[in-house]
Image (cartoon, rainbow, N blue to C red):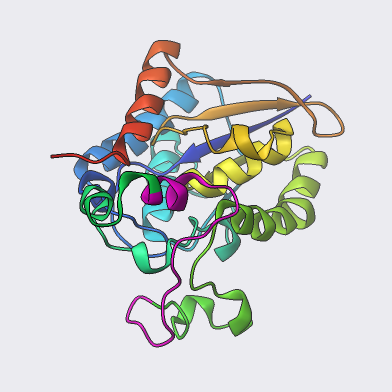
Amino acid sequence: MHRIVLLRHGESVWNMENRFTGWTDVDLTQRGVDEAKRAGEAMKQAGFVFDSAYTSVLKRAIKTLWLALESMDLMWIPVHQSWRLNERHYGALQGLNKAETATKFGDKQVLIWRRSYDMPPPALDRGDPRDSRGDPRYAGIAESEVPLTECLKDTVARFLPYWNETIAPAVRAGRKVLIVAHGNSLRALVKYLDGMSDDKIVELNIPTGLPLVYELDSKLRPLRHYYLGDAAEAEARARAVADQGKAKT
């Protein structure tokens, strides 16, 4: 049996402000820092030790990983970063308040942009200050691969090659792996592992800072999965994620 742990970054500044974040590189809040530390403590208490870790190139995920590994006294393990683990790109919605966007465009339209599997939000214009092209962390990537917007289907398509070519071989070789990423990039992996339908995956919410353990067979098919900690707390935090996108007064 193989075990991997998936961890969504701690609460970010724009999570707190109810903004669409995507590829914008925002930091953790103090609550997010505390969530990351507690995640590390929970994994250590449960007896988890990792050989390597994988994360995105966005600071909220990187810092969460650092803090969790510090809590586990594992800051020395190899860490691999890839843009393929980045959050879904929210296009022209990035930086906008979700409630204000719902007021302007209507709840129904914003729900489609947020939760449709294959309908992306409006794309950024080339040259928009939020465009990641020209950012040095993406310098080695073909310009056509740096998105101006994405739907969840697009996120799945860019995440899975990294899983199949890089992470999965390490897991099969017996390495103990921690993946620290984002709500939508982790949903991309969960969809693949669990064989979830397009309709079901859009209903899934992954809480910030709560380790999600997957036990896999020799072919990396899930045997079971569970959150570390109290099940009721995990459910409540998942509901809170779902409520974040709703219009607020």
Q: Give the residue drawn at x 26%, y 60%.
A: 96
Which corner quadrant of the image does residue 157 belong to?
bottom right
Residue at point 45%, 72% (across, down):
123
| Residue under the image location 49 percent in, 67 percent down | 149
Location of residue 207 in the rendering, given as x and y in whole percent from the top left corner: 41, 32
Q: Is residue 51 left or right of residue 36?
A: right
Q: What residue range appears in magenta?
A: 109-130
Image position, residue 33 (x, y; %) = 28, 42
Residue 129 counted in the magenta span: yes
Q: Quadrant of the C terminus?
A: top left
- Residue that protrudes farthest toward the left in the picture: 249
Where's the N terminus, which quadrant?
top right
Q: At 50% across and 41% down in the image, what residue appears?
A: 74
- Provide residue 219's location: percent of width, then percent of height: 86, 34
Whether residue 141 can be seen here: no
Of 38 and 6, nearer the camera is 6
Q: Main secondary structure of the magenta part?
A: loop
Q: Is residue 74 magenta?
A: no
